[in-house]
Amino acid sequence: MKPPQLIQTITTLVACLAVGCGNTPSMVNNQPSPASRVAVIVAPSNATVQVGGAMQFTATVTPSGANQAVTWSVSGTGCSGASCGAVDATGKYTAPATVPNPPTVTITASLVADSTADTATVTVVVSPSMSVNLTSLDFGNETINTSSAPKKVTLTNTGTAVQPVSARMNGVNFADFTETNDCPPMISAGASCSFSVTFRPSSIGGRVGILVIDGTLDEEALVSLGGTGTHSLS
């Protein structure tokens, strides 16, 4: 009968032969152990890029001793070739001149050594294409709880396509400002419409807000609003 110490030594040797011992990468069932597997991580994982714009992506390969060489590609369900955009050997993506349908494309970084890969999702959007003739409105002094005379801002669709138009108030004291407009739900390329803003201070002192005009993109045009609430004269 073998001594217990010899049995333990034999058992340890068998285990080492099966899974590896020490600091060398181990193999289980002829597959690399989780600690030795190579991984690729693309950053950022999600991005929004305007048509014709660019975004730099990076690929991190782990562990650090692994072959770092990757190839980049771009694909989409609603586009192919140049209509999806292009990505160069460094991971720099350039969006196409028009928005794909659907507007999302996939950027892929693949290891040259094997099929290991990771992806990022890019949403392609149109460039802002609305402008206003005034970027700020100053209402001066106004007695609290009384309304000022309205001030007007003209909006123009400077793009080449029809797009939706809507407005909202934002900012610290947005509730002290109201707007009405004559804009249609969809504004044609080259067309204009106007917004009429009124100031009604609810408290004494400086009051600020922002008129936000949304189109195909949020916040396509911003107008800063300001005024000062004063005591009643009575």
Image (tube, rainbow, N blue to C red):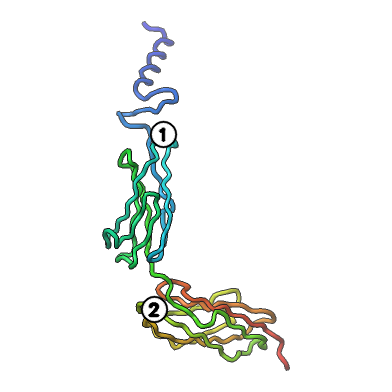
Query: What is the secondary structure assignment of the residue under circle 1?
Result: helix
Q: Quadrant of residue 188?
A: bottom left
Question: Horizontal and vertical percent for residue 159?
Answer: 39, 77
Q: Nearer the viewer, residue 82 or 138?
A: 82
Quadrant of the image containing the N terminus:
top left
Residue at 41%, 10% (x, y): give it: 6
Quadrant of the image containing the C terminus:
bottom right
Q: Amino acid at mark 1?
A: Ala
Label 2 belongs to which residue?
A: 164
Q: Is residue 191 above or below residue 13?
A: below
The earlier-in-sequence mark between 2 and 1 is 1
Residue at 39%, 78% (x, y): give it: 164
Label 1 belongs to which residue?
A: 35
Question: Horizontal and vertical percent for residue 175?
Answer: 57, 80
Query: What is the secondary structure assignment of the residue under circle 2?
Result: strand
Q: Nearer the viewer, residue 60 or 229?
A: 60
Q: Is residue 164 above or below residue 89?
A: below
Horizontal side of residue 180 vs 32, given as left or right: right
Q: Is residue 20 above or below residue 192?
A: above
Question: Horizontal and vertical percent for residue 120?
Answer: 38, 53
Horizontal side of residue 223 vs 125, given as left or right: right
**Which numbered tag is attached to residue 182?**
none
Question: Horizontal and vertical percent for residue 121?
Answer: 37, 56
Instruction: Determine crowd level at label 1: few under 14, some 14-19, many 20+ residues with C-alpha closer than 10 A.
Output: few
Residue at 31%, 60% (x, y): give it: 84
Q: Amino acid at mark 2?
A: Pro
